[in-house]
Amino acid sequence: MQVMKANTEDILFSIVIATYNRANFIERAIDSVLGQTYSNWELIVIDDGSQDDTNGKVLSYQDSRIKYQYQDNKGRSEARNLGIELSTGQYISFLDDDDYLLSEYLQVFYTEISNRNFTVAAFMCDQREINKQGKTIEAQKKEFNENNSAKFILKYANNIQPLCISKEILNEEKFDSKYEIGEDFHLLFRIALKYPIYYFPKTLCVYVNHDSMTMERELKDSLYMTNPYNRLDVINYFFEKHKDLLDKNNVTTLLSNKYNKIAYFYASQAIKTKHISYGLKIIDSIKWGGNKILLIYYKLSIYARALIYSIAK
């Protein structure tokens, strides 16, 4: 593997890993950064109060580009924001501690960013996914229109890992720590409403599914029923704070559809777990600005199942 040598004219990337009790995963993530063919980077690992051997795993690396910072447990968003604050790179990527990068990740981003004259923007690649059975799922084909970044992010962005973002943007737009779930989308969609996003169809990173992921814990422990800031609150923020930008970017209907789909999913989970009143409350919050046929289906489906479960109960 040929490594591109860094020089003073090269762009510096900062990669931020926020981690919490993931000593069993963190080495794979760090090794994937060390394996980059582009060498002018720094890796900032923010340990968000881990109680396992995360500290020992990270500090065992003897590369001066790897920086470790411990903080008391404050949540993933606060950890990532600290990583932004400590970073010195012109562009920042976020790598989850259970995922990893392919070796050409930074080299290709460098090429794409330089082709755009190092503009203040976010750049996005593709990622492949590995499911819990170990099967590889390649990225879907995407239709990209750089004149509507918001629509693209709304349709295709599931997490922040495939993006490399100008630090100038992240100095203005941080992770909102009150959102414990869906904070990636909250940041990305805010960026997309205000800044350009450039996509290139190259698979450069890997998203790994496993039983201790946020979504798995969310469903297993019914976190969406006790967490006051869930995925629906994240989306509702935009209707309350940025309705003008939604209309300007022509994404109001699409965002309503996303909200309704998620509301239906969580209402279904609530009904299945016999939390009928909560399920009805969720489905009653859906947005009438979305697809009306789907909306009516969602409501009728939940009402019918709620009635059946109530009778059975």
Image (tube, grey):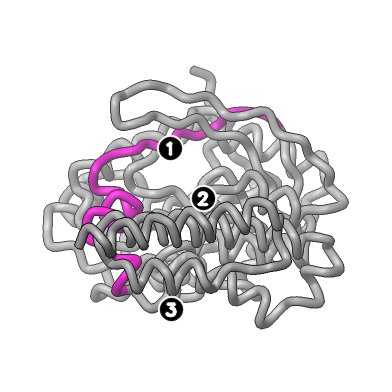
Whether tag 2 and tag 1 are in contact, CB under 8 A, the answer is: yes
Report the span colored magenta. 201-226
Q: Is 79 situated left or right of 173 in this image?
A: left
The image quadrant that residue 133 belongs to is top left
Residue position marked by numbered label 1 in the rendering:
207
Q: Secondary structure at mark 2?
A: loop
Residue at the image point whose x is 79% and y is 56% from the top:
196
Give the mark nearer the N terminus: 1 vs 3: 3
Residue located farthest toward the top when viewing the structure as drawn: 1
Residue 236, placed above or below residue 262: below
Q: Amino acid at mark 3?
A: Lys
Residue 304: percent from left, percent from top: 43, 57
Q: Amino acid at mark 1?
A: Tyr
Q: How many marks?
A: 3
Residue position marked by numbered label 3 in the rendering:
178
Residue at the image point whose x is 79% and y is 39% from the top:
144
Q: Is residue 8 magenta?
A: no
Residue 40: percent from left, percent from top: 55, 43
Q: Secondary structure at mark 3?
A: loop
Alpha carbons under labels 3 and 2: distance apart: 18 Å
Residue position marked by numbered label 2 in the rendering:
159
Residue at the image point whose x is 67% and y is 63% from the top:
256
